[in-house]
Image (tube, grey):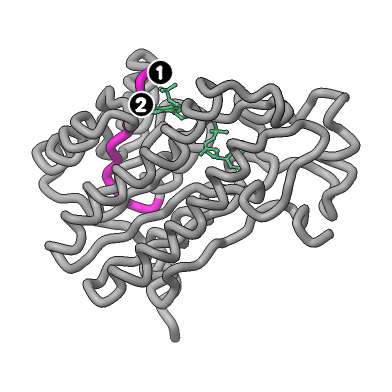
C-alpha cells in the first residue's frame, strides 16, 4: 500500500499565506488548515483577516492574522519573525497576494504598472528571499507561488499587459529559485489558475461570458473550493519530487 493520505497531510507544519484575507488566499488558508497545518494569514484588511482567523480557529485550526503589506520589506521580515514566535516554526510560504489592472497598453499609467509589479512580482521576490533564507538554513521548506494562466496566454477581451508580464515573471522566478534551492531541500512551484470567482475576476459579467466561459473546454469558471486542494498538493509531501513546475488549473482554457 502507498500511504496516500499521509503524504497529503500537513500535520505539524506551519504555513504562511499572503493575501489570506479574502478570495483565493482565504480558500488556500482553509484548505491548508483542513490538511492539518497551522496557518498565519497576512494582509492589510485587519477586520477581514481577523474574521477569517477566528473562523479557522472555530474549525479547530491553529490560525492567526498579522497585518503586513508584502510590498514593504520590513513588514515581510516582521511577518517571518512573528510566525516563528507565534507557531515555533515555518515550513510553507504561499505567495498569493496580487492585483490586476485592466487597461490597453497605451493607457497604462506608470502608477498602474508599478502597482501591479510591486505586489505581483517585487513582493513575491521579497517574500521568497526572506522566507527562502530561513528555509535554506533549516534545510527544508516549500514555496507555492500563485502565478496565472495569464503568464502563459494573453487574456481577452480585457487587456492587462502589466499583469500578464508579472505572472510570466513569477513562473520563471519559480524555476530559478527551484534550481538554486533544490539541493538545500527547498521546493518551489507555481500554481497557474484560470478564471476563478473572486473580487478580482467578475466571472458573472455578461460582457466576459464568451471569452471567459464559452471558450474554456469545461465551459465554466472555477471555484475557490475546487482550486485550493492543488495548493495542498504542492505544499505537501504528495509533491515531494516536484519542483520548478507550473501547475495549470484552468478548466482547460490554455488548451486552445
Ligand atoms: P482578490 O483581489 O480577491 O484578493 C487579493 C488579495 O491580495 C487580498 O487578500 C489582499 O489583501 C491581498 N493583497 C493585495 N495587495 C497586498 C499587499 N500589498 N500586501 C498584502 N496583501 C495584499 O484576488 P484573488 O483572490 O482572485 O487572487 C489571489 C491571487 O490569485 C493573485 O495573485 C491573483 O493574481 C491570482 N489569480 C487569480 C485568478 C482569479 O481568477 N481570481 C486567476 C489567476 C490568478 P488585503 O485586501 O487584506 O490587502
Q: Is residue 16 above or below residue 254?
A: above
Q: Which residues are magenta?
A: 35-44
* Image coordinates for residue 146, horizontal then vertical, percent: 49, 47
Helix, strand or loop under label 1? helix
* Image coordinates for residue 70, horizontal then vertical, percent: 32, 32
Query: Which residue is identified by label 1?
Result: 48
Q: State which quadrant residue 53 falls in.
A: top left
Q: Is residue 35 above or below residue 204?
A: below
| Label number found at residue 18 | none
Judge: label 2 CB < 8 Å from ligand 1: yes
Q: State which quadrant residue 252 falls in.
A: bottom right
Which residue is drawn at the image coordinates 48% and 51% (left, top)? 170
Q: Is residue 159 magenta?
A: no
| Label number found at residue 43 | 2
Judge: label 1 CB < 8 Å from ligand 1: yes
Residues at circles 1 and 2 in contact by the CB criterion of under 8 Å: yes
| In-front residue for pair 251/119 | 119
Q: Main secondary structure of the magenta part?
A: strand
Mark 1 vs mark 2: which is more N-terminal?
2
Distance of label 1 from label 2 (alpha carbons)? 9 Å
Where the C terminus falls, by quadrant?
bottom right
Amino acid at each position: 500500500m502507498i500511504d496516500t493520505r499521509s503524504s497529503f497531510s500537513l500535520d505539524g507544519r506551519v504555513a504562511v499565506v499572503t493575501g489570506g484575507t479574502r478570495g483565493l488566499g482565504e480558500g488556500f488558508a482553509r484548505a491548508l488548515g483542513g490538511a492539518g497545518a497551522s496557518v498565519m494569514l497576512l494582509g492589510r484588511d485587519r477586520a477581514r483577516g481577523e474574521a477569517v482567523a477566528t473562523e479557522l480557529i472555530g474549525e479547530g485550526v491553529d490560525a492567526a492574522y498579522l497585518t503586513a503589506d508584502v510590498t514593504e520589506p520590513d513588514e515581510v521580515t516582521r511577518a517571518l519573525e512573528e510566525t516563528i514566535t507565534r507557531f515555533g516554526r515555518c515550513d510553507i510560504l504561499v505567495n498569493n497576494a496580487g492585483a490586476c489592472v485592466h487597461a490597453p497598453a497605451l493607457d497604462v499609467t506608470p502608477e498602474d504598472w508599478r502597482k501591479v509589479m510591486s505586489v505581483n512580482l517585487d513582493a513575491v521576490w521579497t517574500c521568497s528571499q526572506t522566507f527562502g533564507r530561513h528555509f535554506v538554513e533549516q534545510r527544508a521548506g516549500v514555496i507555492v507561488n500563485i502565478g496565472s494562466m495569464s503568464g502563459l496566454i494573453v487574456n481577452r477581451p480585457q487587456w492587462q499587459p502589466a499583469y500578464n508580464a508579472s505572472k510570466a515573471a513569477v513562473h520563471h522566478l519559480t524555476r530559478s529559485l527551484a534550481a538554486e534551492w533544490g539541493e538545500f531541500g527547498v521546493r518551489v512551484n507555481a500554481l497557474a489558475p484560470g478564471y476563478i470567482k473572486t473580487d478580482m475576476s467578475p466571472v458573472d459579467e455578461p460582457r466576459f461570458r464568451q471569452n471567459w466561459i464559452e471558450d474554456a473546454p469545461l465551459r465554466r469558471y472555477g471555484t475557490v473550493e475546487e482550486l485550493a486542494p492543488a495548493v495542498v498538493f504542492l505544499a505537501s509531501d504528495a509533491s515531494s519530487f516536484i519542483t520548478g513546475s507550473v501547475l495549470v488549473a484552468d478548466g482547460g482554457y490554455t488548451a486552445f
